[in-house]
Every structure is written in structure tokens, then in C-alpha cells.
Amino acid sequence: MADTDGMRSLRPLLISVLLVLALAGCHRGQAAPASPSLPPLMIDDRGVVMPLEEAVTKIAYRPWIPSGVQTLKYAVIPPLGEQDTPANRGVAIEYEDNHIAWLLSQWPKQNFTLLFLRGQDITYAPCTVAHYKPDGVAWTTRGKLAMTLQPDGSVSAKAVEAEARRLIAAGACR
């Protein structure tokens, strides 16, 4: 009986030692920080997000892709007004440049007038930037595409125009 009483008195000490060892084994260093996740992007509500390699199989033209920026996502987007066919579908590219997220969308220019705010008609004026909303611009290309650009966040109209002109200078008007 004496041995049983001795074991009972050591039981709390043994449990404490095991608990300390278990905690020490779990805490070998600081926990790795959680990896940040992207907030919902504007592109997620515009179309079907997919890799570029897959997106180009869903359209019938070669999209213009900005270079020198961090591309976040690609999506196939609905056509501007015609039937939903590869010949009419658009492509959207959400990218980040200088800590600003931008959504660049492009479609084949179809047979309708592209008339925007202040009566600006860009249907037959390639590379002319027109506002379709205060922080969104559009232009047509020489290659028969219609393009729009808008920020995914709050940016001045002047900054949107500057980014559009930068894209055009980089080849977004081909």
C-alpha cells in the first residue's frame, strides 16, 4: 500500500513534467506568419477567372497583355452586345502597377457606336481616351478592339487617364 500512496503523490509531479515537455516541444520557435490572401478583386465579378493559356482558347482574337506589371488574374468576360461566342467575348486582366490595382478589359469592336460621357464618340478615332465614368476610360485600337480601364479602388480621374496613356504608349493601341 505504501508504494501505491507514493505513486499517487508523484502523479501530479509527473503530469506537470509531461505537460512542460509537451509545451516545450510545440514551441520550437515563433509560429510562421499566416500568408496574406488577396481581397476580392474587381475581376472576380466580371467574368470567369482562368489562366491566360485557357482564356485565349475561349476568344477569337489575340488580346493585348501589359508588360512590366504584376498580373493578378485573367478572366473571360461577356460580349458587349452580340451573342456569347468566341468572336464576341472579351478578356479582362487585373494587374498591379505602383501599388494600384487596375482592371483592363478588351473586346472585339463590333458594329455599334461607342459614345461616352460628354458626347465623345471613339468609334472611329483609335487611341483617343474617353471617360465612360469619372474613374473609367475607354479607347479603341487600330486593330479593332475596344478597351476599358478602371481602378480597383479609389484613384483620381487624372491618374486613370495617365495610366491609359501609358498603356497606349506601351502598345495598347495596336
Image: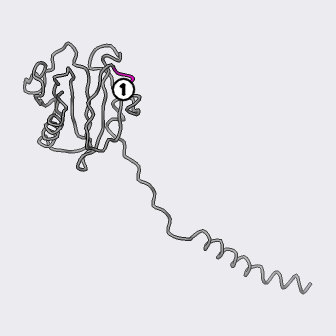
Residue at image x 45%, y 61%? 33
Q: In the picture, residue 96 is in which quadrant? A: top left
The stretch in magenta equals 55-59
Q: In the picture, residue 42 is in which quadrant? A: top left
Looking at the rendered structure, the number of numbered marks drawn on it comes to 1
Q: In the picture, residue 28 is in which quadrant? A: bottom right
Image coords of residue 13 (percent x, y): 73, 82
Q: Is residue 93 magenta?
A: no
Residue at image x 40%, y 34%? 51
Image coords of residue 22 (percent x, y): 65, 71
Of residues 138 and 167, the one nearer the viewer is 167
Q: How is the image coloured?
A: one colour
Of residues 154 and 64, the one nearer the viewer is 64
Q: Quadrant of the N terminus?
A: bottom right
Image coords of residue 132 (percent x, y): 16, 29
Q: Is residue 56 magenta?
A: yes
Mark 1 burial class by Cα count in 10 Å: few <14, some 14-19, many 20+: some
Vertical relation: 146 (above or below) 27: above
Residue at image x 36%, y 35%? 44
Q: Quadrant of the C terminus?
A: top left
Image coords of residue 12 (percent x, y): 74, 79
Vertical relation: 53 (above or below) 36: above
Residue, disc 1: 56
Q: Give the SS element for disc 1.
A: loop
The majority secondary structure of the magenta stretch comes to loop
Amino acid residing under circle 1:
Val
**Residue 61 left/right relative to 157:** right
Vertical relation: 145 (above or below) 170: above
